[in-house]
Image (spheres, helix red, strand yellow):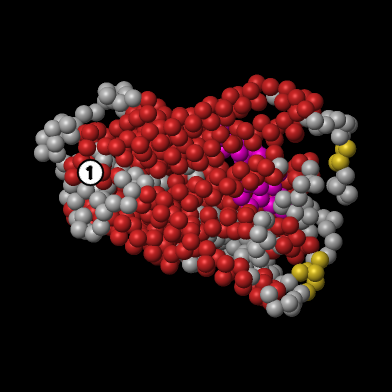
Amino acid sequence: MAGMPMSAIGAASDPRVDNGLNPTSYPNRVLQKLHDTSIPLEEYMHYAKLTREEEERLYGPGSSFQATEGPVKAFFKGKILRKPVQHREVPIPRALSISAEGEPMQENGSNDKYAGDNADKGCRGSVTITDEEWVQASRAARTATWSAVFYLITTDILGPFSTGYAFSQMGFGPGVALFTIFCVLFVVHCLTSFGACSFSSTSDRYPMKGYGDVAFRVYGPWFRHVCNILQSFQFFLNVALIIISSGQSISQMSKGKLCFIVCVVVCAIAGCIIGQIRTLQRFGWLASSAVFMNLLIIFCTMGVIAHSTPNFTALFASYPALFPNGINDPPPVHISGSSPPGLGLVDNVNGLMNAVFSFGGATLFVELMAEMRRPMDFWKGMICAEVLIYICYMVYGCFCYALQGQYVFNPSYQGVSPYGWQTFGNVLGLITGMIAAVLYGNIGIKVLYNNIGRDVFKFPILESKKGKWIFVGFVPLYWILAFVVAISVPQITSWIVFVGAACILQFTYTFPPFLMVGFKTQRDAILPEETFDATTGAIHHVDSGMKRWIRGYKKELLWNMWDTFFALGAATTAILGIYSAISIMNGAYNNGSNLTGWSCKSPTGG
């Protein structure tokens, strides 16, 4: 969800922004230095330290900073409690950023749109803007508070509609244990490692804008390309997955009277149209409303499940093996405290990958941190969001499995038998699904454009006239390809397992400790006699190569060995997950005609 400005949700305004400066983008001179291989890690760390000190001076205890009240809090106080709402902005004296001192004055356009539109015509309007003003404009983009991060993380991650199915594949004991372990490892270890790398190398002078920037500063261009390609692949598959689930919703609402291919085509066409929104500034309130829609689906589904039978029609269409005597004589509901009988390793890993998919979202955390005025407040918003998400997952997953047992459907709101409640859940699911699909598609296209289009094919900047037209043409191509993938393998569970194993597990559990090892090894390899001149950028090392890496690795040997073991274990789990996903796809094609590609038969039956 990083494509939207978080100022739309409870953000505070920045009183340091001058009129006439663009507060929504970084200066071009800053962007050009983001991927400069000649800049050593010591320089990133130097300016990051200065930026952290300056943030403490400007926003820490004893400073004159006070955030304005966000729209949610202002509405609650003013309209509900009838209390006065204060919108105060304490002026902060203009002061040159100590993390950008030494930069010369530069000639740059004062308006990105004007410069971009006129660049195609060969003309350029420019004014003299000092480095101080560039830093002010760069910081103006950071308007997010911890409450905004809470909303966006919850919007991005909260979606417990596969947790009941995950419990049905693992049982109560392993399910609760693994969900808890994954949550704790994600918050305590992986995000701590990832945050340490980010906070120690991002600054006003060298800001980070994505996961690939962290990878670049630790391991270089090769790992940045790996992360960007994998991130683009994940967003693409997320769009395909949402197309499938939305197509199932339409098919179920039509009671199977519409060909399933038509249902999926409708979703793809809607994505081609809505996806033309290039900037997501108007999506802020809509994305935050998706959180409450999801919670409404959760509560309603729990109530219906408690007073009705499972949707045997949808289950028989997708999982005929559950009905050895036919749909008219289903076996009784069975729950298990341990691994359910009759399920093998592939099924258990299947449930495990659903747990991984549930806690996915670390791919966007750099973007969220990059938009925060006080980046250390990120932890407050993140921890609050993860606590809410964990509670929802545990309560909802255990509840669904306890009442429906092996008959939990994925997604769960399509597994209720009353048609009216099916339709209610499907309508809300369609809305939240399309919001998520447009956001993921928008971010995925921009990642491809900026990291492949601009680097390889020399595309113009996205804000230029030509860039906008390229974006317009690329959106339908992106959604058509996602439609082809979705209709070729219309299996929600298989794709959840595959995306969780191949992509989400890497960004959430494999890469953070791997990045931490590389960062600490290079940081700890620095000797007292080695120097870095901030004025000239000159750096003096007494040695290089493998000897340096070994010395740095030994400095915190036990922690580095643990992180290495952790990363290798996560990578091994990913291989098991990919194998499990492929096995499930193959089994579904052989055993269920409703799950084969390019068929009018719907996975929900009918």
Depth order, front residue of 467/390: 467
Q: Disc 1 marks which residue?
A: 317
Kindly identify the residue that appears in the image at 45 percent across and 56 percent down: 481
Kindly identify the residue that appears in the image at 32 percent across and 52 percent down: 598
Query: Which amino acid type corresponds to the residue marked 1 in the rendered image?
Result: Ala
- Categorize mark 1 by other alpha carbons within 10 Å: few (<14), some (14-19), many (20+): many
**Location of residue 484 with respect to 174 vertically, above or below:** below
Report the label total. 1
Kindly identify the residue that appears in the image at 35 percent across and 60 percent down: 265
Depth order, front residue of 265/560: 265
Q: Position of residue 385 (x, y in %)?
A: 46, 45
What element does badge 1 sit on?
A: helix
Q: Position of residue 440 (x, y in %)?
A: 48, 54
In the displayed image of the protein, which residue is found farthest to the left?
A: 328
Q: Position of residue 222 (x, y in %)?
A: 67, 42
**Location of residue 589 with respect to 480 vertically, above or below:** above
Q: Is residue 352 visible?
A: no
Kindly identify the residue that appears in the image at 77 percent across and 62 percent down: 132
Range shown magenta: 189-213
Relative to 198, 154 lies left or right: left
Q: Per the image, is 373 magenta?
A: no
Q: Per the image, is 212 magenta?
A: yes
Q: Position of residue 333 (x, y in %)?
A: 19, 32
Relative to 494, 407 lies left or right: left
Depth order, front residue of 480/374: 480
Q: Is residue 449 visible?
A: yes
- Residue 105, by quadrant, is bottom right
Relative to 604, 499 lies left or right: right
**Location of residue 374 with respect to 113 vertically, above or below:** above
